[in-house]
Image: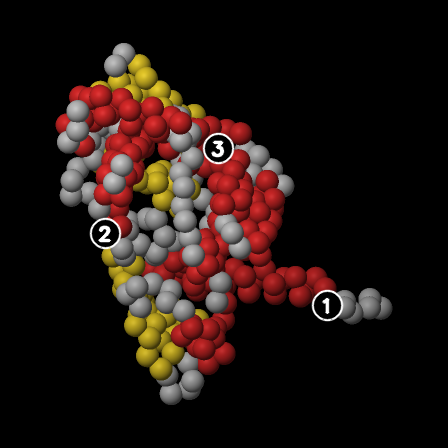
């Protein structure tokens, strides 16, 4: 067998593997033969070769597919790519406030596959740290259900608890999963049949979820990354301009990072700086602004300025009362 034919077969096996993995209901041999430009006998030999390589192929009524829950992919990384994944693993550890067995398993497999012992050991340690955290069984069931529905394009019947505590029953079509950068939380952006529009659901508030047989199609013009391009986190609300003035004490830290792609920073005469950003609403950015304490002043919009000012007044009242309680009391004559 010539080198060209070997390379051609290897490329064809990879293509068949991808086709089967990405087709939830499987494919027939004649479909694979047509897609790959070969005869049926070649496809049968290729399927046997994939099984010998350890690919978990299933067969049902003439259709072939890949069992996703036991499928293992192979990734080759150089040193710098491995370090990039180590950074991702550390972020994943910060984000996972519970024991997620899928995260642990993925990190353990990643650690075992890396040739560099130093990086491998650190990623394995991250997996150990996550495994030691408490397991929330219901959250994991919900996450697995939404993940499977999203991958297979199936609607989900779920029970949802809003932030107010109100419980509602919904049927949703998952469009994309997303995580928050400001809190350890996972979300699904989905078409909500109850509201007749796209909505964002926090998975930690889903109390029950069941996959339905009904399929759905994601509109071709839906781009989740464009949709969230102005969001501070995961909420896509009316875009507003936020202007912040930072003190000289905080200015150097502010300049060190790109907090949002729209940010513009100008230097102040006193050594401080002003930041202008355009974000989708102010609900999510509020906590970040408050984290700077007295080193930031909200210049706009008025709604955010008033909210932060009211919060600061309540804090001052709280600590003022605490100081009064801790102050020595005069002796009674």
Residue that badge 2 annotates: 226
> Where does residue 1 sit, x and y in percent of width and height?
27, 36
Q: Residue at x 51, y 52 (%)?
A: 115
Q: Position of residue 47 (x, y in %)?
A: 31, 25
**Mark 2 and mark 1: span between their CA atoms?**
55 Å
Write down the residue under mark 1: 327
Q: Mark 3 falls on what kind of element?
A: helix
Residue that carries the numbered disc 3 in the rendered image: 139
Q: In this orientation, which residue lies closer to the viewer: 130 or 181?
A: 130
Q: Residues within 10 Å of mark 1 (few under 14, many from 20)?
A: few
- Tell me the element at label 1: loop
Q: Residue furthest top?
A: 61
Q: Nearer the viewer, mark 2 or mark 1?
A: 2
Outermost residue toward the front in this view? 1
Where is residue 8 shown, x and y percent of the image?
23, 39
**How many numbered dots are placed on residues in this image?**
3
- Lower sequence index among marks 3 and 2: 3
Task: Give the Cα separation between the discs numbered 3 and 1.
Answer: 47 Å
Which residue is depicted at the point 60% across and 46% down? 129
Q: Earlier in the sequence, mark 2 or mark 1?
A: 2
Is there CB contact under 8 Å for labels 3 and 2? no
The answer to which image quadrant residue 266 occupies is bottom left
Tell me the crowding category of disc 2: few under 14, some 14 to 19, or many 20 or more residues within 10 angstroms, Cα based.
few
| Rendered view: 294 above or below 138 | below
Q: Earlier in the sequence, mark 3 or mark 1?
A: 3
> Residue sitting at 46 percent across and 73 percent down?
253
Asked if labels 1 and 3 touch by Cβ distance under 8 angstroms, the answer is no
Q: Nearer the viewer, residue 320 or 160?
A: 160
Mark 3–mark 2 Cα distance, whole angstroms, equals 28 Å
Q: Nearer the viewer, mark 3 or mark 1?
A: 3
């Amino acid at each position: 067998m010539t080198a060209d034919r070997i390379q051609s077969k290897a490329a064809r096996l990879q293509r068949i593997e991808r086709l089967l993995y990405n087709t939830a209901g499987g494919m027939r041999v004649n479909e694979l033969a047509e897609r790959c430009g070969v005869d049926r006998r070649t496809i049968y030999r290729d399927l046997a070769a994939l099984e010998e390589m350890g690919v978990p192929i299933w067969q049902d009524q003439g259709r072939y597919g890949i069992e996703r829950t036991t499928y293992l992919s192979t990734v080759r990384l150089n040193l710098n790519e491995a370090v990039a994944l180590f950074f991702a693993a550390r972020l994943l550890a910060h984000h996972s406030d519970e024991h997620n067995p899928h995260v642990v398993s993925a990190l353990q497999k990643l650690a075992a596959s890396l040739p560099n012992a130093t990086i491998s050991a650190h990623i394995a340690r991250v997996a150990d740290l996550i495994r030691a955290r408490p397991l929330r069984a219901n959250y994991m069931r919900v996450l697995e259900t939404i993940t499977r529905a999203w991958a297979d394009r199936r609607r989900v019947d779920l029970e949802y608890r809003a932030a107010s505590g109100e419980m509602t029953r919904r049927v949703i079509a998952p469009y994309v999963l997303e995580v928050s950068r400001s809190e350890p939380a996972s979300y699904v952006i989905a078409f909500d049949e109850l509201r007749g529009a796209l909505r964002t659901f926090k998975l930690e508030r889903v109390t029950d979820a069941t996959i339905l047989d009904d399929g759905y199609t994601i509109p071709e013009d839906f781009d989740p990354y464009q949709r969230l391009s102005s969001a501070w986190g995961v909420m896509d609300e009316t875009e507003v301009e936020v202007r912040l003035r930072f003190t000289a004490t905080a200015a150097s830290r502010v300049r060190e990072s790109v907090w949002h792609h729209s940010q513009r920073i100008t230097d102040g005469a006193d050594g401080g700086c002003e930041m202008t950003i355009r974000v989708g609403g102010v609900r999510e950015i509020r906590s970040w602004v408050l984290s700077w304490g007295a080193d930031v002043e909200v210049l706009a919009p008025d709604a955010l300025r008033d909210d932060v000012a009211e919060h600061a007044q309540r804090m001052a009242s709280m600590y003022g009362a605490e100081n009064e309680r801790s102050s020595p009391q005069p002796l009674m004559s």
